[in-house]
Image: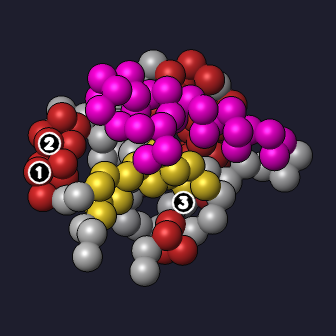
Amino acid sequence: MRRICFLDMDGVVSDFAEQAYTFTGYDVTTFKDRELTPKEKIIQNKVFYSADYSDRFRSTMKPTKDAQDVMRTCQTHFDEVFFLSRFRPPKEHPERLDVVRQLKTDWVTKTFNGLIDTNHVIVTDKPKSSYII
């Protein structure tokens, strides 16, 4: 049986919080694991709007400090490594899925120096759980 590792991108190998702060000035780590106030929900929507509609947001994101170690560990202990990322485009802009898919694929291949085949980058609008058996 093949052992497969699925890695999330945002916050695991790509530093989403740092990029969000750079683009918006908001510290999104304060929003984790709790119910947000109405004002915080508005701020969170602004951050996600920036991430969803700025190609530069995705293309200039830095890797997390542990990204290379995480990748090496996964390659050592698993037969295949996939990057699995969910992106739900707004109904009025369904084409953003294809754009973000390409941006994330380009980011992975650049960050990991071509170690990952582009077929191993999955950007989907479906729940991640649908990929795990």
Q: Which residue is mark 2?
A: 72
Q: At 52% from the left edge and 50% from the top edge, which residue is drawn?
A: 122
The amino acid beneath tag 2 is Arg
Front label number (3 vs 1): 1
- The disc placed on residue 37 is 3
Gap in Å between the C-alphas at discs 3 and 1? 43 Å
- Magenta residues? 93-120
* Location of residue 112 by image quarter: top left
According to the image, label 1 marks what residue? Answer: 76
- Mark 3 residue type: Thr
Tag 2 near tag 1, CB within 8 Å: yes
Out of 118 and 65, give the one closest to the viewer.
118
Q: Give above or below for 18 relative to 60.
A: below
Q: Quadrant of residue 88?
A: bottom right
Q: CA distance from mark 2 to mark 3?
A: 39 Å
Residue toward you, 21 or 19: 19
Colour scheme shown: secondary structure
Lateral position of residue 125 relative to residue 7, left or right: right
Instruction: Identify the residue at image location x=40%, y=28%.
Output: 109
Q: Position of residue 10 (x, y in %)?
A: 41, 45
Residue at the farthest bottom position:
133
Residue 113 versus residue 124: which sits nearer the camera? 113
48 vs 33: above or below = above
Q: Specify the amino acid type for callout 1.
A: Thr
Which secondary structure type mostly characterizes the magenta part of the structure? helix
Whether residue 73 is visible, yes or no, is yes
Q: Position of residue 94 (x, y in %)?
A: 81, 46
C-alpha gap between disc 2 and disc 1: 6 Å
Magenta residue check for 115: yes
